[in-house]
Amino acid sequence: SQKIEQNSEALNIQEGKTATLTCNYTNYSPAYLQWYRQDPGRGPVFLLLIRENEKEKRKERLKVTFDTTLKQSLFHITASQPADSATYLCALVNTGGFKTIFGAGTRLFVKA
Amino acid sequence: ETGVTQSPTHLIKTRGQQVTLRCSSQSGHNTVSWYQQALGQGPQFIFQYYREEENGRGNFPPRFSGLQFPNYSSELNVNALELDDSALYLCASSLDRGAYEQYFGPGTRLTVT
């Protein structure tokens, strides 16, 4: 069955360092991969989308890579800040965009 | 904040009852998707509506049903509530069926006792 795996353990890093989060998937050939941020008690907020034919995407301090051979995406936050502390969700989208599968998310804590 | 609103914010129901949750999509968006999020888990896709028609469905039983109205607002109905239905229910709107950037509402927290 289709499966998305994200680090279940929280990631603790020091302010100013780069946070790297991993998303691995099996039994799926997504057209798109997305990353969302979710704060406690709130809905997810869209951050970045990367297509299957793209290797890398950047937006301000965020960078996403997408390796369809390894079936893996890496999400980087450079120069991290305490305000970046949240849960980050990886999501795969099928062709046609009607079904999105989310991972369980990785909790990030950035210490000042 | 996105322009997506959901009501009510919280709800407590008894097993066997029925519930209706509501969602107003962002202005200009014609597609709404509904998700169920259990504590500590990622959102699970329930179904998507595009221009008032169901456009895809996840692995949820038929007692989960929905509607989309001409103004593109939407309802999620759950019949015969079970304890496991306790979760955060999220709706997300997008510009079009093929647009993959989704804007989520704050969710409705449903507790079934």
Image (cartoon, coloured by chain):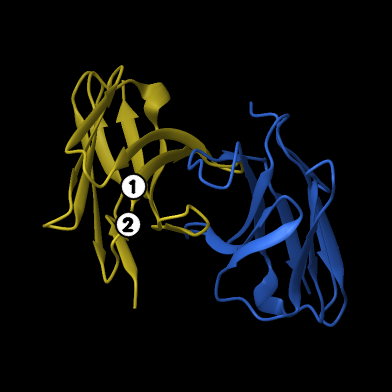
Chain colours: A yellow, B blue
Residue pictured at 40% horizontal, 56% vertical: A95
Q: Which amino acid does label 2 sit on?
A: Pro
Q: Which amino acid does label 1 sit on?
A: Leu
Instruction: Using the image, tell me which numbered label, if any, was put on residue A30.
Output: 2
Left or right side of A10 for A87: right
Asked if disc 1 and disc 2 are in contact, CB closer than 8 Å, the reply is yes
Disc 2, SS: loop
Disc 1, SS: strand
Left or right side of A38 for A48: left
**Chain to which mark 1 belongs:** A
Q: Quadrant of residue B30?
A: top right
| The C terminus of chain A: image quadrant | top left
Dot 1 corresponds to which residue?
A33
Q: Is residue B38 visible?
A: no
| The N terminus of chain A: image quadrant | bottom left
Q: In which quarter of the image is residue A104?
A: bottom left
* CA distance separating discs 1 and 2: 7 Å
Residue pictured at 60% horizontal, 36% vertical: B95
Instruction: Give residue B111's position: percent from left, percent from top.
Output: 75, 65
